[in-house]
Image (cartoon, grey):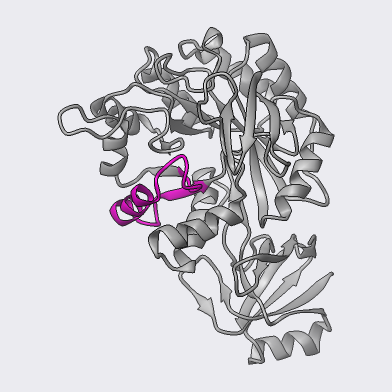
Amino acid sequence: MNNKLFLCGKVITGEKKSYFRGSIATENDEILFIAENGDEATNEFIQNFRPKIIDLSHLTIIPGFIDIHTHGALGLDFVNPTQRTVDRIARQFVKEGVTGFLSSIMVLPRKEELRVLKKYATLTSPHQGARWLGIHNEGPYMSHEYKAMMDERYLRLPDINELNENVHVAEGKLRMITLAPELKGMEEFIPACKEKGITVMMGHSSATAPEVLHAISLGADGFTHLYNAMTQHTHRNPGMVSAALLKGETFAELICDGIHVDPLVIRLTYQTIGSERIVLVSDAMPGKAMADGEFVFGGIPCITKNGKAYARDTGRIAGSVIGMDDAFRNIQKFTGCSMEDAVQMCSVNPSKLIHLDQSIGSLHPHKKADFIALDNDMKVVSVIIGAERIL
């Protein structure tokens, strides 16, 4: 057995419990228990198992961030999957406190989509980086009106035969799909996704609020980048945003960069639906973690400059270049929320949304020992994944 004891400062577990000065005991890659430093359980663990002791006592410990919507970094795009791409991006993500992520892919021609999914089926999670948790297919069943950066030539109506083929070729790695619920065929398609354990997110959509509420009754789980590429909340024509603010059992992604959504609207959203429903995402594009310049994102030439990414020819926002650590700090700055609430939105909720909360997303006995250490400025100082210090 490989036993370790992490001596920590404050520990925020993500389970409505915190420790002023905590200890995290691990066995192999899992948490055995969390206790206050120097209590009986900690002393017995030291005496009986003689664990390796890691001193993080001057730092705040929180669950690692989970980014369920990200398209790439370092000039690399997840629509071009290789083991090297996943490994390099996973190592980069660790630097911002991410311990798990989905690779998001944009709309592709059908043959290319199948090729990409087949390739992902052969890839594995990196040994020295954030855990790769699977695939988020952003499309292709979307509205032409709200396509945003998607190539409208390849948008189409939902097809259960395609879904079955995608699940088969991806070998269980397809975890989440974004779709427009107003499209013909969703009555059968959404329940089919749920039967296969795929999280259904709504976005890139011209749906009315009643159409969205109906999709939720069919099993839809939440909203992709709330406010962006969807019908809005207006007093005579309520749209997707109206339904998101109304329906309490769904999750809503937010890109908390201060560009995609104004900070005042982020604050209003937090006050309206609360930390239990918000999922912070980066929606990062390939120019993330690179100097300002030109990058290709989903086949479209894009420019990054002064923290903003936009399409070269149209000026349209083209994803973000923020890290999850930026989102974690920004949500506290924009809303005045507690660090505990920020953990809920960056770690706990995304794990619940993709049905992995039994193993990751919070700190609890028998869950993976995935956590990060922050200094007084909420900067990531150290990252532990599976009880191994990666950073």
62 lies above or below 298: below
70 lies above or below 313: below
Name the residue at 34% across, 21% down: 206
Q: Quadrant of residue 23?
A: bottom right
Tell me if I can see residue 359 in this picture. no
Name the residue at 41% across, 22% down: 180
Residue 257 left/right relative to 120: left
Residue 117's x, y, as percent?
69, 23
2 lies above or below 351: below
Quadrant containing the C terminus in the rendered view: bottom right
Quadrant containing the N terminus in the rendered view: bottom right
User: Residue most toward the left?
Assistant: 236
Q: Nearest the camera: 179 or 95?
A: 95
Q: How many numbered discs sit on the rendered protein?
A: 0
Residue 89 left/right relative to 108: right
Residue 263 left/right relative to 364: left
Q: Nearest the camera: 47 or 37?
A: 37
Magenta stretch contains residue 274: yes
Tell me if I can see residue 7 in this picture. yes
Residue 190's x, y, as percent?
43, 25
In the rendered structure, which segment of residues is drawn in magenta?
254-280
Q: Nearest the camera: 79 or 172?
A: 79
Magenta stretch contains residue 48: no
Residue 18's x, y, as percent?
52, 76
